[in-house]
């Protein structure tokens, strides 16, 4: 049955190696998501062979439509004997990657009671014993293991007014805040409003950090930085910051759907972020949390815009210390080693590291470091080197791989020393 004609009741897909190394193994994907295939052990289906690239192909299911895509591999893929860059799949189709042939099938409900459960049981029993279930979109690569999440803001905040802003819908959340798509009641302007979590509004340190972000943001007027509009505290103690609403997607969202990025696009966005950071450093402010989730790509201009200075501080600040002894601020997969050892002492070179980690992710489709626990990630950031860009993505120019690897040096003195230096290297092509 062609995918375009597949029933809307499709609940997953089966992918099984039927010829070549690993025959009999495969994956089941329950619901929308993706299965990655290649030589690297980080793929959902890892296959050996000199003709197989580390990240060779991806099969994606959305609703009742499944697509196979060649990830710009060296030797390509064949769909039913024809070489393709991408193609829509139907049950029984065969995909050839190197010496391996993979058969694709839709998982559909069978007739009878509890059809979804029956279909899943059928999928698990019909597949060979070596077949395992795929985790949708491999979230483990992008999400740092965390302690229990802070309770979300109550749903009754939707529709509530904060200052002149009406909260319309939730657009994102972080460790201590939630971002709402909002509307200015007088001007009818669409804005983004970040509200500090209810439970944390009474914690003085976080209230101070939130107020500091508002103060810093007022000074950061630059095309590459999301524009600050307003800040305030409600009568019941909720802190909020209003910024311009940027129509677009974060780099993290883009990477989840289409990683890795074309080299030219990754470099262009890295230059945009470098320019924004160079301006912030001239104020002088460092960001300290540069990561794919804090970079949004404006849909109309395709420009990268930097947001969330929640961890920023003045480079020469001597004021109240807002970091408790032993507290680590930043996102572990993109944090610099010196921030792990002493957050307060981190300087502008921590942002150089963050930009290098961002560029690494855009070029390879992977964070520099991953792990099953926070401790494992921390240890890898401190003691190991990320896999070379050239190993994961051979088509990346040598000069660009060297820029990334220098920026990710453990010793800040071995990196580019200023954002202007980093920017100059990106413009000059090494």
Image: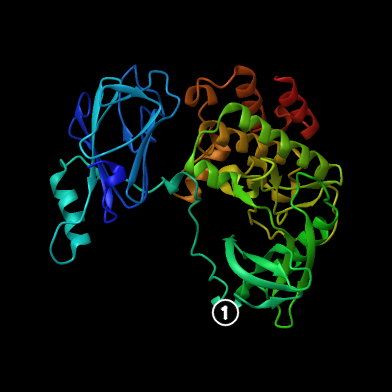
Query: From this viewpoint, which residue is outermost toward the bottom?
Result: 235
In the foreground, 95 or 37: 95
Q: Is residue 145 above or below residue 430?
A: below
Query: Quarter holding the N terminus?
Result: top left
Instruction: Tell me what residue is drawn at x 36 percent, y 38 percent.
Output: 67
Residue sitting at 66 percent across and 68 percent down?
195
Secondary structure under badge 1?
helix
Which residue is at the front of the view, 14 or 10?
10
* Residue 104 in the figure: left or right of residue 427: left
- Report the front residue among 391 and 276: 276
Q: Position of residue 19 (x, y in %)?
A: 19, 26
**Is residue 409 something one can see in this rendering?**
no
Is residue 50 toward the left or the right of residue 220 in the image? left
Q: Please name the residue shown 80% across and 56% down the image.
A: 217
> Few, some or many C-alpha atoms within 10 Å of disc 1 (few <14, some 14-19, many ≥20)?
few
- Give the labeled residue for mark 1: 156
Residue 413 lies in quadrant: top right
Q: In the figure, 152 relative to 371: above or below? A: below
The percent coordinates of residue 27 (x first, y second) are 26, 41
**Residue 406 seen from this side:** yes
Left or right: where 383 falls relative to 278: left
Q: Is residue 290 left or right of residue 208?
A: left
Residue 41 at x, y = what percent?
36, 33
């Amino acid at each position: 049955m062609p995918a375009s004609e597949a029933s809307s009741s499709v609940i997953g897909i089966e992918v099984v190696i039927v010829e070549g190394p690993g025959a009999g193994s495969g994956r089941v994907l329950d619901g929308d998501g993706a299965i990655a295939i290649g030589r690297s052990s980080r793929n959902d289906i890892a296959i050996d062979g000199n003709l197989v690239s580390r990240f060779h192909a991806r099969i994606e299911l959305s609703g009742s439509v499944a697509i196979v895509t060649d990830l710009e591999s060296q030797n390509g893929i064949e769909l039913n004997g024809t070489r393709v860059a991408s193609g829509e799949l139907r049950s029984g189709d065969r995909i050839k990657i190197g010496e391996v042939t993979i058969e694709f099938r839709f998982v559909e409900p069978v007739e009878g009671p509890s059809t979804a459960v029956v279909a899943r049981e059928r999928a698990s029993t019909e597949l060979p014993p070596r077949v395992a279930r795929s985790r949708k979109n491999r979230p483990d690569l992008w999400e740092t293991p965390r302690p229990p999440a802070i309770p979300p803001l109550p749903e009754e905040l939707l529709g509530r007014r904060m200052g002149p802003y009406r909260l319309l819908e939730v657009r994102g959340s972080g460790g201590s805040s939630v971002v709402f798509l909002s509307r200015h009641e007088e001007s009818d302007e669409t804005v983004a409003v970040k509200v500090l979590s209810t439970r944390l509004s009474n914690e003085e340190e976080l209230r101070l950090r939130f107020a500091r972000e508002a103060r810093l943001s007022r000074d950061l007027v630059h095309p590459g930085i999301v524009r600050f509009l307003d800040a305030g505290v409600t009568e019941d103690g909720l802190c909020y910051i209003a910024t311009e609403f940027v129509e677009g997607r974060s780099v993290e969202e883009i990477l989840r759907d289409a990683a890795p990025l074309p080299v030219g696009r990754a470099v262009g966005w890295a230059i945009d972020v470098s320019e924004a950071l160079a301006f912030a450093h001239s104020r002088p402010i460092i960001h300290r949390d540069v990561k794919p989730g804090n970079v949004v790509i404006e849909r109309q201009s395709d420009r990268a815009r930097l947001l969330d200075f929640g961890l920023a501080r003045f480079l020469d600040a001597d004021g109240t210390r807002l970091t408790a002894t032993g507290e680590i601020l930043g996102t572990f997969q993109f944090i610099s080693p010196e921030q792990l050892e002493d957050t307060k002492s981190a300087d502008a070179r921590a942002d150089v590291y963050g930009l290098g980690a961002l560029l690494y992710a855009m070029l390879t489709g992977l964070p520099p470091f991953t792990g099953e626990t926070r401790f494992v990630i921390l240890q890898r950031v401190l003691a190991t080197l990320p896999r070379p860009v050239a190993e994961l993505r051979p088509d990346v120019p040598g000069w660009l791989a060297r820029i990334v690897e220098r920026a990710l040096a453990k010793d800040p003195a071995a990196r580019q020393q200023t954002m202007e230096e980093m920017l100059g290297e990106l413009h000059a092509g090494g």
